[in-house]
Amino acid sequence: MQLTQGQRLPLSSILQGDQLTLSLTLKSPHVIDYACFGIDAAGKLSDDRYMVFFNQPATPCASVRLAHEGAFSLNLTTLPATIERLVFTAAIDGYGAMRDLAPSAFAVQAADGATAATCEFQGRDFASEKAIMVADLYRKDGAWRLQANLQGFNDGLDALVRHFGGEVQEQPVVPARISLEKKIADAAPHLLSLAKKAQLSLEKNNLANVTARVALVLDVSGSMNGQYNKGRVQEVVNRLVPLAVHFDDDGELDCWGFAAKPQQLPAVSLANHKDYVNTVEGGWKRWNLGARVNDEPKVIRQVIDYYKRSGDLTPVYVMFISDGGVHENKAITQLIVEAARYPVFWQFVGLGGSSYGILEKLDTLPGRVVDNCGFFALDDLHDVSEEALYDKLMNEFPSWLKEARGKGILG
């Protein structure tokens, strides 16, 4: 059954029984927080334990559970009588508005998984709203009814909590971090333009106050020679330095090179980043990598073990450069599934190559605790502006941070 905005109907008209799943699927370029509010007869969240979201994935009675991102598993029979209404919401975390939505929907599924009803909506249905009450389930005359709500708020999740009478914990005042631009201007003024563009992307993606370690893994197989000789790999180093300076107080970028075997290289810093690939350890042609053929699993293993040994739960952002020819798909899959348990996010970037194998299928890779990686490819680094590159690099990192925190992977 297809529902329209504002439509109300008895739940019993579309499914039998009181066990169901209500799924919210918002196609957005922004990070979305999903929540369900258990509301009393006064229209208030009288018990904070009946707000279900990523930090509190179930009610005390387990009648409402956040089964996975945006999907709520419900058993209405065991829900306390004091809960008169369940309001299912979606809110943008940070920058953006609901007008940016691609075609989206919510769906009601019966206990056997069959879809009983859907309601479609998209960005043109909204304006500056940052939060939506998407759907309601409510009691009337002893029976449950469904409403396609789709009413919005111009503020985010905090506004929803306040609307339902909940309290929002005020964030403690912390000393302002020295701006990225000031750090770069003082130590490496030639990178100031990059720093400004990186800062804008970080603010857009709500990452301005995130602390993280940053790492770079460089493919140094023979087919990458052209990328090194043209200076493209050094440009990658230069573009990543501002991110390392912003995220980590020591401003260093952990670095590995790999071919037939991996080598951990000296950390990239503001002091040594200039012409790094041609000067550090004698330059890339002299790095101790064995035969110049690509063996990704060995370097992935080394990076996992390095951060695992540290015991540090600070998030790690790894940018992994490859020009393709990926063939160890099974071994890479096993390692990425294992790595999902650790505080490491992998951003794979294809550079001037082809045949990226499993790297192109990481978004749908099953068996992981969290989605811990992303992939995009460029024929040439100059095909994309610096601003667009930073946006691509930061596109999936915020979602991973939220999911990893919810699973206790991060400190």
Image: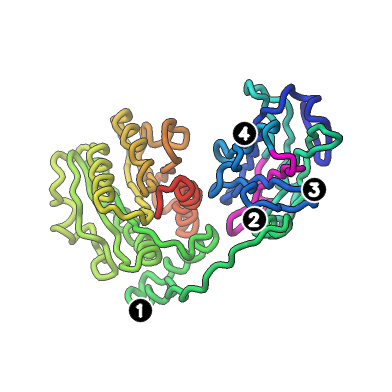
Do residues under tags 3 and 1 come within 8 Å of each other at their CB atoms?
A: no
Q: Residue at x 63, y 21 (%)?
A: 112
Q: Which residue is mark 4?
A: 73
Q: Which residue is mark 2?
A: 157
- Mark 1 Cα shell of 10 Å, populated few (<14), some (14-19), many (≥20): few
Report how far apart the C-alphas of labels 3 and 1 lie in the structure: 59 Å
Please identify the quadrant where the N terminus is shown: top right
Where does the magenta region start and end? 80-103
Mark 2: amino acid: Leu
Tag nearer the camera, 2 or 3: 3
Q: Nearer the viewer, residue 87 or 347?
A: 87
Is tag 1's residue or tag 2's residue first in the polypeptide sequence? 2
Q: Which residue is mark 1?
A: 186
Mark 1: amino acid: Asp
Q: Position of residue 252 (x, y in %)?
A: 29, 63
Task: Decide whether residue 328 is among the magenta residues.
Answer: no
- Mark 3 Cα shell of 10 Å, populated few (<14), some (14-19), many (≥20): few
Please identify the quadrant where the C terminus is shown: bottom left
Q: Nearer the viewer, residue 354 or 100?
A: 100
Element type where label 4 sits in the image: strand
Tag nearer the camera, 1 or 2: 2
